Image: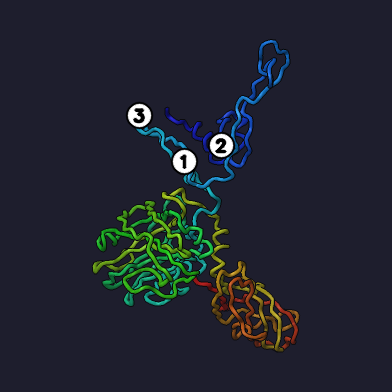
Amino acid sequence: MKITPRVMLAAVLVAAIGIPSAIAAGLFSTLPIVGSASFCASTVTGTGGLGGITGQGQGSTGSICGQTVPAGPSFLTGQEMIPADTQLGGGASPQTVRIPVTLLGNYGGTPRNYLDNAALNITAINGTATVTGATTSALAVTNMSADRWALDTNVGSGAGRSAIVTSSPSPPTGFTNVMKVFRTSGALTQPVCVHQEIPSAIATQLAGQTVTFSAWLDALAGLAADNNNIVNMVVYTGTGTDQGFGSWTASPAITPAWTGIATAVNQALTITTTFTRYSVSASIPSTATEVGVAICFTPTATGAGATDGFAWTGAQLEIGAAASNFEVIRKQDDLNRAQQFFYAISETAGPTPRGTCHFTTANTACQWDIVFPQPMYLAPTFTFAAGFAVPTTTAETALTACTALAADATAGTIVAVAGMTHMMAQCTSGGTTAAVGLSATVFDNGGSGKFTAWAGM
């Protein structure tokens, strides 16, 4: 018998989700309901006999339960299988298959995708500038062309580049940004890779699971002549805690030097010049506490240039043996997650109020409390560029630029720690009327002031 969409929907509602309204609709009324106690699906009413069953010479009336449905399970595991219509024409076999409930979308909660900034919508770090990848050294902010994604070529002669673009190639339907990954020179013959590490607090949830890594990939025009359009999708694991990308295993290995580093999958794919979704699956060791992903291409001695590489978007790492629909995350939610690792402010035209500072040394030292929008995931490093401005009068009718901007050490050594929500910076002012104890506004005023906090990957 072919399972129709109506039958499939009923099965999903009752077996997979357990919505009581399905009972009212008369669909699968005798199946247990997830999280519910046993219940009576139907009663029998009659005259005479014990419990109301008609008997000889009995005149009483009553009813008994004709069908008791046992209690449902308290939860689902994600391994449940449900019927689905294949919609194959002409009665072709099979008309019905069984699929895991995880393919229905946001099963198991949101988010399903363990990767941050998967659609590349957050580009606070380097915008759309072309970024030079790291080589054999630790990754830095300058090696990231989208928040939470870093480029590395683990060889001294590495010439890897990446850039966020909105055309050439145009994004696939449903996306606005793609990342080009390419190399500019040299007979490199070493993998050029873009990486993301999943925080250990989250990565441990993947231990012992089968995962699927997917992304939309597109070969740039020069890749065919270079390596026949081959791109590798990689998942690797470790047993440390948030070790980041501070050092690398010996070249040509592409993995970071994590404790217990192991490659779960490194699969070569032959891609085309049309954006297509590709996926690979792997088993994560039960001891894993770190998980990372990478998308790479290995140049040969042929080629080099802005089209020698690939473009990608829509990366997803999820529990399960197959890729489910790409999970769309609101841009603001992506930003909130990205700002746990990187936050920057840059001076704009003004005068525009930016914050408040407090003078601890008359006329010169003003302490500015910079508030982060999100607690930093790890202890951040800070960079400063002089700029911004503070008033020279108590009426705040005139401004002077900060001639220096640095960490404020007035209260002692500034210690960067995980979970930081504030940073005290010191503006050295050239004013002449600011008294000790005066609180004043910090302004953007068209200068080159900048502050960044980066917690690594």
- State the residue position of label 1: 81
The Cα–Cα distance between marks 1 and 3, rounded to whole angstroms, is 25 Å
Percent x, y of residue 251: 32, 73
| Tally of marks | 3
Q: Residue at x 38, y 53 (%)?
A: 279
Percent x, y of residue 119: 47, 57
Q: Is residue 355 left or right of residue 168?
A: right
- State the residue position of label 3: 90
Of marks 3 and 2, which one's residue comes earlier in the chain? Answer: 2
Specify the amino acid type for callout 1.
Met
Specify the amino acid type for callout 2.
Val
Q: How is the image coloured?
A: rainbow
In this rendered view, identify the residue nearer to me: 156 or 205: 205
With respect to residue 123, does 6 lie above or below?
above
Q: Is residue 185 left or right of residue 126?
A: left
- State the residue position of label 2: 14
Quarter location, residue 364? bottom right
Q: Residue at x 59, y 28 (%)?
A: 26
Q: Tell me whether circle 1 and circle 2 mark residues in contact (CB < 8 Å).
A: no
Q: Residue at x 30, y 69 (%)?
A: 190
Percent x, y of residue 302: 24, 67
Percent x, y of residue 19: 60, 38
Disc 1: CA contacts within 10 A as few (<14), some (14-19) or many (>=20): some
